[in-house]
Amino acid sequence: MLDLKIIRENPEAVKTRLKRRGGDFKELDELLIPEEARREGLQQSENLKSKKKKLSAQVGQLKQKGQDASEIMEEVRVLNIAIKELDDKIQIWEQQVQEKLLGIPNIPDDSIVDGADESCNRRVRDWGTKPEFSFQPKSHVEIGEELDLIDLKRAAKISGARFAVYKGQGAALLRALINFMIDVQTRENGYQELYPPF
């Protein structure tokens, strides 16, 4: 996830660099509106809390002297309501900002070739010997779809391109690989498995 401070301080530079990936990334503009509201709301909330603290101290002083503090206490009560309402709005703005941030990809490194998809990539180096087959090999996507292990269309509806919904034996294989790696890490590399509360 991109650093919000970088986006806030120089949104045009971020847009320019992201355009190298292809796409318009309108999420950046959509993110800045609730972010500005959130920042202003935080400042207002802090000001109200500061005012409430001062008034609360005055209430204490008046009560110590045996004087009537009901007017100031009413002001504190009204401030509490305003602070709660503002904090609720801040939470909504924060959620909107986080949702927009999740839709913005990482900024490509300067060494990365510009392009919208794999066809724009360039080969940097090869590793190993490329096997030769007496038939046209299928991609992992073709194999996964033919064996009904993955559902790319459903994944695209849920989370966008380049993801898969694993199903049946595909989901079982994925789970087995996860379990295998956890076993390797905990048995051979000294990691301790944890299951935190959600």
Image (cartoon, grey):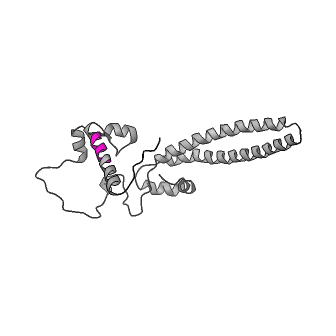
State the residue in front, 179 or 133.
179
Please state which of residues 156 and 64 is positioned toward the viewer in this rendering: 64
Q: Nearer the viewer, residue 43 or 35?
A: 43
Res 57 → quadrant = top right
Q: Is residue 70 magenta?
A: no
* For residue 128, above or below residue 8: below
Which image quadrant for residue 163? top left
Q: Residue furthest left?
A: 134
Give the number of marks: 0
Residue at image point 42% right, 44% down: 195
Q: Is residue 53 left or right of residue 37?
A: right
The kind of secondary structure the magenta stretch mainly shows is helix
Report the magenta residues as a range. 171-178
Residue for point 66% across, 40% down? 86
Residue 1 rendering spot, x and y as whole percentages = 47, 51
At 54% from the left and 45% from the top, the residue drawn is 97
Q: Residue 25, image x and y in percent?
A: 46, 48
Q: Is residue 26 visible?
A: no
| Residue at the image point whose x is 28% and y is 61% from the top | 123
Percent of width and height locating residue 3: 51, 54
State whether residue 140 appears in this view: yes
Q: Is residue 124 above or below residue 137?
A: below
Determine whether, in the image, residue 125 is placed left or right of residue 3.
left
Picture quadrant where residue 49 is located? top right
Horizontal placement of 83 versus 34: left or right? right
Q: Is residue 45 above or below residue 110?
A: above
